[in-house]
Image: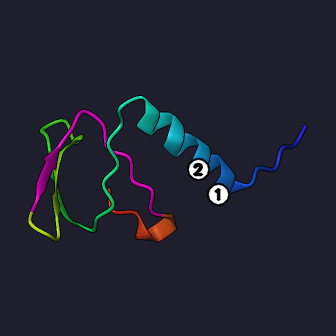
Amino acid sequence: MHYIFDTSLVAQYLRKYAEDRGVKRIDAKIEAANLAVNGSVKSILLQDGREITADFFMDCSTGFAACL
């Protein structure tokens, strides 16, 4: 069995689903990632100077452009 999805529709659905449940989306460019001792992402520094800490980060860039 093979499924083909319209990725833009899936992305719209997942964004609404997550935001309706309190997920905060930040559209910004990453300057650097600060790693914990175990290698997980501890925080990220954005180009505008903000440092973001969270329990979970999702990098939505693609392929070799991935930042995290």
Indicate yes or no whether the magenta region holds residue 1. Answer: no
Seen at 19% across and 35% down, the residue is 38
Query: What label sits on residue 8 in the rendered view?
Result: 1
Residue situated furthest front in the rendering: 20
- The residue indicated by pointer 2 is 12
For the point 60% across and 43% down, the residue is: 13
**Residue 39: x and y, percent?**
22, 42
- Spatial CA span between label 2 and label 1: 6 Å
Q: Are marks 2 and 1 in contact (CB under 8 Å)?
A: yes
Indicate the position of residue 51 as horizontal and vertical percent values: 11, 54
The image quarter containing residue 36 is top left
The part of the chain drawn in magenta is: 50-61
Q: Quadrant of residue 47?
A: bottom left
The residue sitting at 24% across, 40% down in the picture is 40
Q: x, y (%) of residue 24?
A: 32, 42
- For badge 2, the amino acid type reads Gln
**Where's residue 32, x and y in %?**
17, 63
